Amino acid sequence: MSAQIFPRNANAIFLASLFGLVMLVVGTIAAMVGFYLSPWYTDVGVAKAQPVPFSHKHHVSELKIDCRYCHATVEKAATAGFPATETCMSCHSQVWTTSPLLEVVRTSYQTGEPVVWNRIYDLPDFVYFNHSIHVAKGIGCSSCHGRIDQQQLAAKAQPLYMGWCLGCHRAPEDHIRPREEVFNMEWDVNSLSLAERQRLVIEYQIPTDGRLTNCFVCHR
Amino acid sequence: MVHSVRRSIFTRIARLAWLPLCFLLVACHVDMYDQPKYKPNDVSNFFPDGRAMQPPPANTVPLNSYNPDSPLMTGRIEGQLADQLPPEIKLDAALLAHGQSRYNAFCAPCHGLVGDGNGVIAYRGPMTVTSLHNDRLRTVQIGYFFDVITNGIGKMYSYASRIPPEDRWAIAVYVRALQLSQNADVALLTEAELQQVRAGR
């Protein structure tokens, strides 16, 4: 008969610590998932500092400048592009010419050194994206970029998860609008009935046979 | 007996202990997220001006696609401003509609939606913008508008880098339509249109 090594309550302590361990693991996983979905990781709604405090609210909402004035390639190319310094100067050579906030733009125009904007929407390099097809098929800027015309400094409206891309590729009728309204920031999808939107999907010949969710559409 | 059942459950759980580690691996993806390749608008530390998208050298023209001396590209026929559309551009309602959307995007901020030189930027001043409705501009050759968009004039910058030549012609055509709309001859209106005008007043 050997001596008792463990005290009487060892079983209880063992069970309690087993329970604690499980809770720790679950908690850690939950915290990581939470972090992954939170703005700390996704940057959603977090405005980034820019070399010039450019305001879409001012230029788009108040001055009513069309997106294409500055993002001119959005209908023709994969990228919407950032405006050249010359684009800003077409107005700012004459209006607000002495604003200290625009010093960076004026220097850039004189020296030819581009203004380096901090990117807000940036897909991983293994994803292929194309603006022109979405614009041509009646997907509006605000469906993906939110109400950027209400933002002083631009911030993400979207974490750009793959599931989000797929969701619309499976059911474009939830987001589609007439082509003329693509640049309209105030457009409300529900102003057309589902049947009308389904008619648009057919009219714009968007494939609904699942082709759009093939991996090679975005990973090529 | 009871003892061994409990142990086997414990070892089974213990065997799965590596699973949470996978969650750590999921987050380790930076290698393929930022590949050593350039995408448009990237910053480059290879080129001295810091751009991955290098502007083409001066006087570069696209190979085979355009004839840089054709009326389509210059707005001129044998050195004179063109007084008609180049053969590649077909005048129809679609061209006018296209011109309208381009005009509203690129010209209206300054020239105003009807071309009276009172767009929102001009209105807030101090920029003064020419109205498109004067006798000189009404009678000038259509190639002149193409030329102004391509090369700019006075304080107005060139729009050639943002508006492709076909679109410039569409705008020129639409400007002509705007001029007509602001200077229409009553005698040319149909009876129905006349009634609309009267009802509008």
Image (spheres, coloured by chain):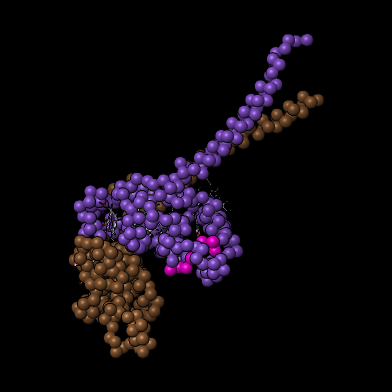
Chain colours: A purple, B brown
Residue farthest right in this picture? B1
- Where is residue B26 drawn, in percent x and y? 54, 41
Give left or right: position of A218 versus B41.
Answer: right
Of residues B68 and A136, the one drawn nearer to the viewer in this rendering:
A136
Residues in magenta, as a range? A173-180
Q: Which residue is drawn at 68% across and 25% down?
A: A15
Instruction: Give the residue displayed 60% in from the left and 64% down from the top.
Output: A209
Query: Is A94 colored magenta in this rendering?
Result: no
Residue B175 in the image: state x and y as whole percent. 29, 75
Horizontal side, residue B49 vs residue A43: left or right: left
| Closest to the observer, A171 or B153 | A171
> Going 40% across and 49% down the picture, which residue do you hit?
A155
Q: Quadrant of residue A142?
A: bottom left
Q: Is residue B175 visible?
A: yes
- Vertical comparison of B114 with A121: above or below: below
Q: Does residue B46 lie above or below A129 as drawn?
A: above
- Residue B192 drawn above or below residue B149: below
Whole-percent x and y of residue A85?
28, 55
- How many numbered discs? 0
Task: Tell me, yes or no, if residue B50 can be seen here.
Answer: no
A203 left or right, relative to A122 = right
Quarter of the image for the N terminus of chain A: give it.
Answer: top right
Question: Residue A204 or B195: which is nearer the viewer?
Answer: B195
